[in-house]
Amino acid sequence: MRLSAERSSAGRWRQVLLPFLLSLFRGALPDQIRYSIPEELAKNSVVGNLAKDLGLRVRDLPARKLRVSAEKDYFTVDPDSGDLLVSDRIDREQICGKKPLCILDFDAVAEKPLNIFHVAVVVQDINDNMPLFKQSKIDLKIGESTKPGKTFPLDPALDSDAGPNSLQRYHLNDNEYFDLTEKQTPDGRKYPELILKHSLDREEKIFHQLVLTAVDGGDPPQSGTTQIQIQVTDANDNPPVFSQDVYRVSLREGVPPGFPVLQVTATDQDEGINAEVTYSFHNVDEQVEQFFNLDETTGEITTKDHFDFEMVNSYTLGIEAKDPGDLAAHCSIQVEILDENDCAPEVIVASVFTPLPEDSPPGTVIALIKTRDRDSGENGEVYCGLLGKTEFTLKSYSKNYYKLVTDRTLDREQTPEYNVTITATDRGKPPLSSSTTITLRVTDVNDNAPVFQQPAYLVHVPENNPPRASIAQVSASDPDLGPNGQVSYSIVASDLEPRALSSYVSVSAHSGVVFAQRAFDHEQLRAFELTLQ
């Protein structure tokens, strides 16, 4: 008996479509969604209904997976109501310092279809800080020959609040000899100056006690005070004089501690000990003394700590030169910090859609990538690329976002898993870069037909064989996975009469074993042919 087997025709191509992968990306809203909140709101306070403001329906939220994508988790989205909630402490002074406008920018991401919405929350200041003087007592020495109208700059009070809640004015207790005026530094800080109204007489009164008060503009206002003690000294004819009232210096943010900034010089026309000048910081905030050193004898200024342009890009240094009789001169130094390319760009995977069916068409979205660089200018401009030649490509999407999409048809049987490396590089000189790797699993579809180990089988069976005897076994394999790769066998054609076929042979659907259903008689049947699939 001759037994033949033919390869079955390929099964119908079955596509498994994931709607959220195949949806076209819609553009983000042209304008930001904006909210305004006071600082220090309690955790879980409602900022606004983000879902409603974005035009999303509450019943769609479980599928859309609306969420916040931000550098710091100040906010979260309630998955049931779509409310934007406060999730961490928001301290305006810590976040924005003295900036007049404090804005937290972040993105809201929704899926199915994928959308990105830009959100801005304006953080309003509350009057949670009072003006404070650095010293509870100020000691001044003024020569008795000092003429009325002479001014004496004083250290300012510090108030971390901004706008109307910040320091607004100073006042001095009523007294006979001194008055008060307010001045302003180039960066906008107010500081007090003491004015001598009448000549002092050391023989009449050696010490004068004053109270200086700083008041903010809160409702109700808060205030802080310091005591001023003035000692009247013998005559000292000439005060020190600086060569310039204002100095301007530029520093790269990468200069090391100890780097020379500038040397200021003040001269005094007196002789002997009265001509000796000492230098000190005057009318500066705490950041100046954190980042700069001043040699009190030479007037040389050096750096004390590493600068960070992304945090502070300029400083105002007030310098006082004083002689032994406490006659003083003042100047200011404007220090501009120049940005360097010291921040590598970041690659943030905002969303990943994996596993991916192998029959996904080219252009299917796999992941949403966000880039960020804290530098400014060209140092902060970032472009993305893929490492090596892959079946994927990156497409610019919105603002700092990219889509990772398939560039060609995938084949799970050839490559079941991909490690896709995304690099982000800035345009600094030299450029900085970083990378991240996404692992993508490819799921199987039934795109392969079973293949027999040989196209034809020739089987010899002796007559008078016992019924149900095994006379042959065929074998086929399928590279697909799971049910798609499971093979079953059946007889699809024969040269025997259909009614007679089942009485002669059968095939095990699971094992491919062919059985004789009856004893064969050589004189009645010498050969027959079967086609299996």
Image (cartoon, rainbow, N blue to C red):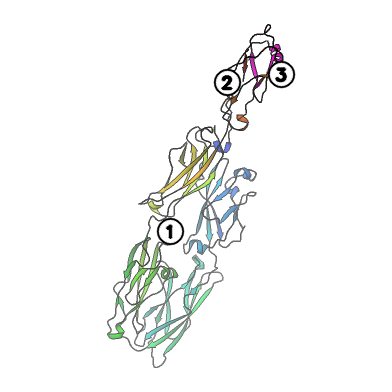
Distance CA(mark 2)–CA(mark 1):
65 Å
Question: CB under 8 Å between callouts 3 and 2?
Answer: no
Between the residue at mark 3 and the residue at mark 2, the CA separation in whole angstroms equals 30 Å
Could you tell me the amino acid type at mark 2?
Answer: Ser
Q: CA distance from mark 1 to mark 3?
A: 85 Å
Residue drawn at 48 percent across, 61 percent down? 96
Crowd tier of the residue under label 2, counting other residues whose Cα lies within 10 Å: few below 14, some 14–19, many 20 or above: few
Quarter of the image for residue 55 reads top right
Q: Secondary structure at mark 2?
A: loop
Which residue matches tag 1?
A: 310
- Residue 15's x, y, as percent? 58, 30
Label 1 sits on a secondary structure element that is loop
Q: Which residues are magenta?
A: 486-513
User: Mark 2 or mark 1, which has the lower sequence index?
Assistant: 2
Specify whether 95 is left or right of 58: left
Q: Position of residue 460 (x, y in %)?
A: 62, 14
Residue of label 3: 468
- Looking at the image, is 109 positioned above or below residue 299? above
Residue 255: tell me if it is visible.
Answer: yes
Is label 1 or label 3 in front?
3
* Nearest the eye: 446 or 276: 446
Disc 2 target residue = 9
First in sequence: mark 1 vs mark 3? 1
Q: Position of residue 53 (x, y in %)?
A: 58, 48
In front: 341, or 532?
532
Which one is closest to the eye, mark 3 or mark 2? 3
Instruction: Tell me where residue 199 appears, x and y as whole percent.
Output: 37, 87
Contact? badges 1 and 3 (CB < 8 Å): no
